[in-house]
Image (cartoon, grey):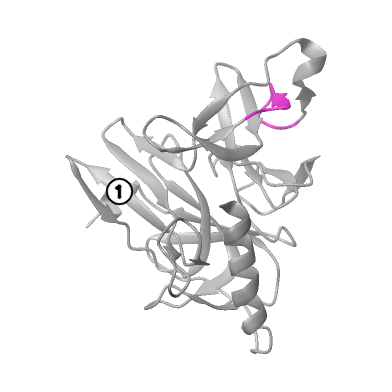
Amino acid sequence: MKLFKTIALMIVLSSCAKKELPVAPPTFNDPNWTRVEIANGKEAHAIYGNIDDTLMVSTLTEIYQTTDKAKTWKKTKINHQPIYGFLSVRDTIFALEANSLKNKDNQLLATFSQFFTLDKGFTWKRCSQYNVSEQRAQEFATVSLNNQIKFKLKENIEPFKGEPANGSGYVLKSDIEVFTNGFSKILSVPFDNQITNIHVDGAGRLYVSATRAIYDKTTGKFASAEKNEPAIIYISKKNVKELID
């Protein structure tokens, strides 16, 4: 299924290759959200920590860390692939490298960890060298706020014309689905970049990982891409429950 998605996205990107690519706005000005970037990171994926202390972010091929509110970023590990989740187990954080398995509820999982850190990502150790199990798992791109509100990344696929909805098709913009009091809704966000992952910190702020790909507001289809290639993170300025309509 992932292969079909990748092929479909490449077809769409190719069809738009001749379009003039917009430059990212010089400033992202929104009363409720802040945008931070990791230069040349291409895509942001898993996030751990908080912007006021230590924030760790997986990009397309590396792991970065900032301790000065995203003014500077330090590359702490090269992965050659994204990390799909950071799993915290007491004082240990595991980097989860796969997201293809599903649990009994058909929920996508982030799984399997070859590396772990004991210092919030400053240094990394290989699990096999310390007889630490590599078999780890957690729900992919799913976070909870005070065990009352759940946020989950919702992938959207448009089936190829004339084919059944079997999971393959054109990749549309992903949404953030909010579950509360037995109901669900889509969280409104003031940006149109493709979303890859989400994280919530201890203050209830939501972190949204994104790519440079820009999708049409109405159709959800790929429209263009930012000329620069940053890994992009949008952070709510307040507790995200205040942004739920």
Q: Is 149 placed left or right of 24 in the picture?
A: left
Residue identified by numbered label 1: 178
Which quarter of the figure has residue 146? top left
Residue 126 on image: x %, y %: 79, 23
Q: Quadrant of the C terminus?
A: bottom left
Query: Is residue 95 visible in this depiction of the protein?
Result: yes
Q: Nearer the viewer, residue 147 or 35?
A: 147
Instruction: Name the residue rendered at 59%, 23% in the picture.
Output: 136
Instruction: Name the residue rendered at 82%, 15% in the picture.
Output: 129
Instruction: Name the residue rendered at 65%, 89% in the picture.
Output: 20
Which quarter of the figure has residue 203? top left
Q: Name the outermost residue toward the top.
A: 131
Vertically, is 75 above or below 93? Answer: below
Kind of residue at disc 1: Val
Label 1: how many Cα within 10 Å (few below 14, some 14–19, many 20+): many
Query: Is residue 48 visible in this depiction of the protein?
Result: no
Residue 127 on image: x %, y %: 75, 19
Q: Nearer the viewer, residue 88 or 80?
A: 80
Which quarter of the figure has residue 128? top right
The segment highlighted magenta reads 112-122
Q: Main secondary structure of the magenta part?
A: loop
Q: Secondary structure at mark 1?
A: strand
Residue 29 on image: x %, y %: 46, 71
- The answer to if 129 sits in the magenta stretch is no
Vertically, is 112 above or below 234? Answer: above
Residue 64 on image: x %, y %: 71, 45
Q: Is 50 placed left or right of 161 in the picture?
A: right
Q: Nearer the viewer, residue 183 or 22?
A: 183
Q: Is 175 placed left or right of 234 in the picture?
A: left
Vertically, is 225 above or below 172? Answer: below
Instruction: Name the residue rendered at 69%, 61% in the picture.
Output: 42
Q: How many marks?
A: 1
